[in-house]
Image: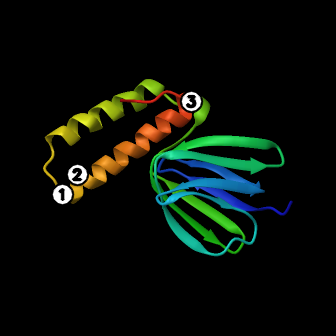
Amino acid sequence: MPTFQFDLVSPERLLFSGQVEQVDVPGSEGYFGVLADHAPMIAMLRPGILTVKAAGGEQKIVVLGGFAEVSANRLTVLADVATAVEDIDHAMIAAEIKEMEERVKQMEAGDLLDRTISRLDHFKSLHWDLTGTAMH
């Protein structure tokens, strides 16, 4: 399978740089897959699991926002936060969900409320992806 260059960068460090076969990205409009020779595009990220497929196997990384830039034979993801799935603090995600639910209860109708509810939904989806357990 053809490969392309993939770089994953967070504010702290370069998390991944190398040749890969496919990357599945949690875009703001839904997951999308990138293969070699993908059409150029830029997409916002939502909280979710980014999956990297290379000759050595598959790696899953949790990203919490940022954006992705696809060019001729390169994908660059600039993530607000990125952590390997096995290093995730599940209690931290559950606490973030609870805190966001409390903020939503105190907000007035409007754009900020809509954006916060959307982000809360993404965090609940991420929690489900990681644990298989729904948050109410």
Q: Amino acid at mark 1?
A: Gly
Classed neighbour count for the residue bearing mark 2: other residues with Cα under 10 Å, few (<14), some (14–19), many (≥20): some
**Residue 31, above or below 122:** below
Label disc, if present, on residue 87 of the rendered structure: 3
**Distance of mark 1 from mark 3, alpha carbons?**
36 Å
Residue 23 shown left or right of residue 81 in the figure: right
Q: Amino acid at mark 2?
A: Leu
Percent position of residue 53, x then y: 74, 49
Residue 111 shown left or right of residue 130 in the figure: left
User: For the image shown, how many numbered marks are present on the structure?
Assistant: 3
Q: Image point 59% across, 34% down: which residue?
A: 85
Dot 1 or dot 3: first in sequence order is 3
Where disc 2 sits, the SS reads: helix
- Tags 1 and 2 in contact by the CB under 8 Å rule? yes
Quarter of the image for residue 38 reads bottom right
Q: Image point 18% across, 57% down: which residue?
A: 110
- The residue at which mark 2 appears reads as 113
Where disc 1 sits, the SS reads: loop
Q: Image point 51% across, 50% down: which residue?
A: 10
**Residue 59, above or below 118:** above
Q: Quadrant of the C terminus?
A: top left
Label disc, if present, on residue 98 of the rendered structure: none
Dot 3 or dot 2: first in sequence order is 3
Percent position of residue 97, x then y: 35, 34
- The residue at which mark 1 appears reads as 110
